[in-house]
Image (cartoon, rainbow, N blue to C red):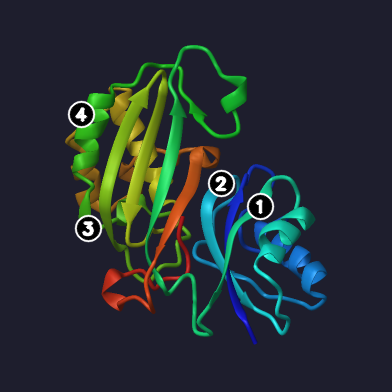
């Protein structure tokens, strides 16, 4: 029974998130319906990360097993033709029977986009958090430096986060600014629910001048979610890449919890 790995790109605006839920359309259900039509059999798909409602992806990795053997172009071209315009398969591969996109993930890269000009941008309304007050990017970068490394990120997890513990490692956190657009890129071994968006919300509070850069470390050390900034809107967030290993990762990464951003 072949096992397939697909890489998906999607605009999450009109979905309740990756995971099947009773309250609306999900990416997972949409992909599974299209696969069932292509393969003429029911298929269950698992993903590397359960992106929230409104969150986008450039490199979501999913996998499934099937009794049928089709050429890979049937997934890249044929499956894409069966999917709505806001979801596409950008790559397909046959993988080991034991492949699990979540447990074989060594880390993920997320990108958060902010439009920081005094006038709104209609073309960016689905992909950027639009903030009209000028942000101090230098202070945001200074604050971000306090969050890099391996820490207890309890102050940046959602109240309903089901992870067993809050220890995670951010391997890189950069902020690029050009022509009114800020791109915050965060690499890590794994993420807690809403962790990226809560970090972004906290850095924006610093950028607005409401707190000094050192406040980010105080929030981190407090392990208190109520001390951090607001959760940034979902539509500015994109799962850019899932970095895969050759097998299940070491549990030392702290990445074996089922939920993430």
Q: Residue at x 26, y 48 (%)?
A: 172
Tell us which disc is closer to us: 4 or 1.
1
Within 10 Å of disc 3 (Cα), the crowding (few <14, some 14-19, many 20+) is some
Dots 3, 2 in contact, CB < 8 A: no
Q: How many numbered badges does the structure rendering display?
A: 4
Residue 88's disc is 1
Dots 3, 1 in contact, CB < 8 A: no
Residue 212's disc is 4
Q: Nearer the viewer, residue 153 or 136?
A: 136
Q: Which residue is mark 3?
A: 151
Tell us which disc is closer to us: 3 or 2.
2
Q: Earlier in the sequence, mark 4 or mark 1?
A: 1
Residue 22 visible: no
Tell us which disc is closer to us: 3 or 4.
3
**Can you name the residue that lies furthest to the bottom here?**
1
Within 10 Å of disc 1 (Cα), the crowding (few <14, some 14-19, many 20+) is many
Residue 249: percent from left, percent from top: 34, 75
Dots 3, 4 in contact, CB < 8 A: no
Tell us which disc is closer to us: 4 or 2.
2
Q: Earlier in the sequence, mark 3 or mark 2?
A: 2
Marks 3/2: CA–CA distance? 26 Å
Residue 56's disc is 2
Marks 3/1: CA–CA distance? 36 Å
């Amino acid at each position: 029974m072949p096992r397939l790995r697909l890489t998906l790109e999607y605009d999450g605006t009109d979905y309740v998130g990756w995971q099947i839920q009773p309250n609306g359309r999900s990416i997972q259900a949409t992909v599974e319906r299209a696969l069932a039509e292509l393969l003429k059999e029911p298929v269950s798909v698992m993903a590397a990360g359960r992106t929230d409602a409104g969150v986008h992806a450039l490199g979501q990795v999913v996998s499934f097993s099937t009794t049928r053997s089709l050429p890979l172009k049937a997934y890249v071209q044929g499956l894409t033709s069966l999917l709505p315009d806001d979801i596409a398969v950008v790559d397909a591969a046959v993988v080991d029977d034991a492949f699990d996109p979540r447990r074989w993930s060594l880390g993920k890269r997320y990108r958060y986009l902010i439009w920081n000009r005094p006038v709104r941008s209609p073309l960016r309304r689905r992909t950027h958090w639009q903030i009209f007050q000028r942000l101090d990017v230098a202070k945001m970068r200074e604050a971000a430096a306090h969050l890099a490394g391996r820490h207890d990120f309890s102050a940046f997890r959602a109240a309903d986060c089901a992870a067993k513990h809050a220890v995670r490692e951010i391997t890189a956190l950069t902020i690029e600014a050009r022509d009114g657009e800020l791109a915050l890129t965060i690499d890590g071994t794994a993420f807690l629910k809403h962790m990226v968006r809560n970090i972004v919300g906290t850095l924006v509070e610093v950028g607005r001048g409401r707190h000094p850069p050192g406040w980010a470390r105080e929030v981190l050390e407090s392990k208190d979610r109520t001390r951090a900034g607001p959760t940034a809107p979902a539509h500015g967030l994109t799962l850019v890449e899932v970095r895969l290993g050759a097998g299940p990762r070491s549990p030392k990464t702290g990445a074996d919890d089922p939920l993430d951003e």
